[in-house]
Image (cartoon, coloured by chain):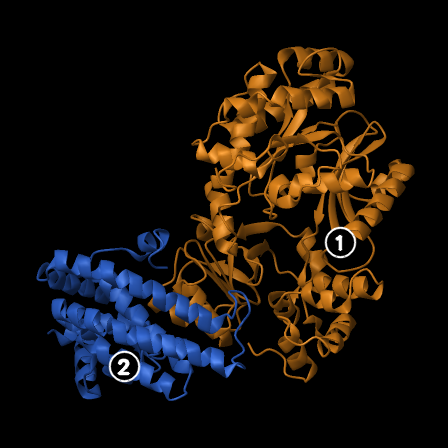
Chain colours: A orange, B blue
Amino acid sequence: MTAVSRPASRETVALVLDGRTGLGADLLGGKAAGIERMLALGAPVPPAFVLTTEAGRRFRAASGRLAPALWARVPGLVRALERATGRTFGSGPDPLLVSVRSGAPQSMPGMMDTVLNIGLSPEAHRALAAGDPHLAADTRRRFAAQFTATVGVPPPDDPWRQLRLAVEAVFASWNSPRAVAYRAGRGLPSGTGTAVTVQAMVFGNRDASSGTGVLFSRDPLTGDTAPYGEWLPFGQGEDVVSGRTDARPLESLGDAMPRVRERLLDWARALERDARDVQDIEFTVESGTLWLLQTRAAKRSPRAAVRHAVALAEEGVISRREALTRVSPAQLDALLRPGIDPSAARAARILARGKAASPGIGTGVAVTVPDAVGEPDSGADGTVLARPTTDPDDVPAMSLARAVVTETGGSTSHAAVVCRELAVPCVVGCGTGTAAALRGRTVTVDGGTGLVYEGALPVRPPHADESSLAALAAWAADAPGLPVTAALSRWRDGHRPVH
Amino acid sequence: MSEELQVLQTVRLKGRPTTDQIAAACGLDSEAVDRVLRVQAEAGRCTRTHGRHALAPAGRDRLRQLLAAERAGLDQSALARAYEDFVAYNTALKSLVTDWQLVDGTTVNDHSDAAYDAGIVERLTQLHTAFREPLAHLAGLAPRLGRYPRRLSDALAKVRAGDHGWLARPLIDSYHTVWFELHEELLGLTGRERVHEAAAGRAG
């Protein structure tokens, strides 16, 4: 038997996370690897176990079934969570509920499935309701809706059956159309698969001293060194992650529970120092107790990427050369163009999302027929052309439009190619029905991010005057051969990228 | 071959062309184009504003009739097979043009790297050469496409002479403009609709 075909040892397939597994994100997935890191530092993390990407590989090899031998190991792992929490899975006076989350080696935010509150059997519901009818009702409503949407059937009564169906659905979500499209669009490998993390639930919807939120150890939009967070009292994790609008600024957590906020910020600093990068932390407060659910490197705006990289280097956390690798050519390019004012973008409603096809910002009234695109000298406000796809006789209108939006097509489509040549901002592939939905509204199109916002948003000038950029350009002189070196030296020599 | 069909279709493909642009695309002289367009204008099928021509609704109807009559006389199964062959070349051309415009899929090519640009011009030349025979075959099946080999060669010659706008700039007969018109012709000749092809990933 060769090394390649030998079955992996038990410990690489299914294991309890304890901060000492010694396994990396390739097996654990990003989510469990983050939990491992937090546990190793002694952070307050609800107990969890992981079925690794190796388990996911076997699941796919078995045509989407959990092998009996693997499933047989799950009760023992759940038992470990029961011991750590003093609760019983799906039963007893204080029932243990768990979350089942995907976790691929590379981050694919929002692309795969999560099911919360697994274990909410009729018995568990009665036990919860005896203590707190509001909590029980709210939890059951969330559970039934999310389980049905993800698994495809309503939740069965048996908690073990719930767990098995949820684990299978999350493993299978690796091959969901949106996940496949996400990987294809970013050139990510499709063979790695996902791991599944099962974690004891804590309740942000338990009482007035509970809630859930996200915290960035530094501001991911402006690049400020101050942390940035959102907080939703009486909520569960998905509420904030999915962008529900009634989240409050982090300061409101400080007003209600100053000690919790302080502790959270301490942990954010510690996790950032350990990862040597800005962290995006999901947390829950249950009856005044802080729990950290996950941490990962924060997605950030181009401006924040440059400012964070320089700040981390100046604080001695990373080297100057490493700072240069923390910024991509695309981020640099975007920084040297005008953009939408970040605070306006944060507050604005997003009307459509598609693929970024031609960079730049365009504002105007959306029209759906080329003849309605205003002549530039007609004195009318600008127009944005929204079409199912574009064809050759749309080109004159495209050249006059402030921006172009299409329903179908990718970054090599006619609309994309023509708009790039014309330097007209363009977003493609927003989905059928987008043109009709936008018609008559004033919209702002960001061809660099693929977002279409409601209203005329203020545009800020290029960030070419950003002082961090000058620092980075100076360091680039000593680090030839990095992806951003050439662009930085060109910029420093006064040759801004030509558009 | 009908000059009327040739001229009306060119006006449709180009949106609001001048007489000279139509003449160049059709391979006719300007007087002949003007003669056709005068007749069409009198019949209410064409309008002329600031020296640019456009189709009126009656002109679109007339064009549809002429195209339907043309299709009825063509070997549809041979055309359908030829279109399937075209799809692979089309994918290659589109990715080539995208690489011309974006360096790593997201960063705008500022054309400061001459070697990078030269590599793409070389890819275009190879594609053009490989496509010569399938294109001749298409023109054999649909004689109205007979101008395309020349129009594509002209654009390529200008690109190779260093005038890079002729690779993808719209509103002139750049390589991409001509190619896209050819694609539009093939969709029409085989009775396909762009929006369906786009959804299937073959156009857009």
Question: What amino acid does circle 1 point to?
Answer: Val
Residue A46 lies, in percent from the top left, at 75, 30
Q: On the rendered structure, is B76 left or right of B170?
A: left
**Pointer 1 and pointer 2: residues touching (CB < 8 Å)?**
no
- Residue tagged 1: A278
SS under mark 2: helix
Label 2 is found on which chain of the structure?
A: B
Q: On the rendered structure, is A499 left or right of B54?
A: right
Residue visible at 57% across and 38% down in the picture: A53
The residue most toward the front is A1
Q: Is residue A437 visible?
A: no
Q: On the rendered structure, is A96 left or right of A287?
A: left
Callout 1 environment at 10 Å: few (<14), some (14 to 19), or many (20+)? many
> Viewer-proximal residue, B108 or B119?
B119
Residue visible at 13% across and 59% down in the picture: B78
- Residue tagged 2: B153
Q: Is residue A446 visible?
A: yes
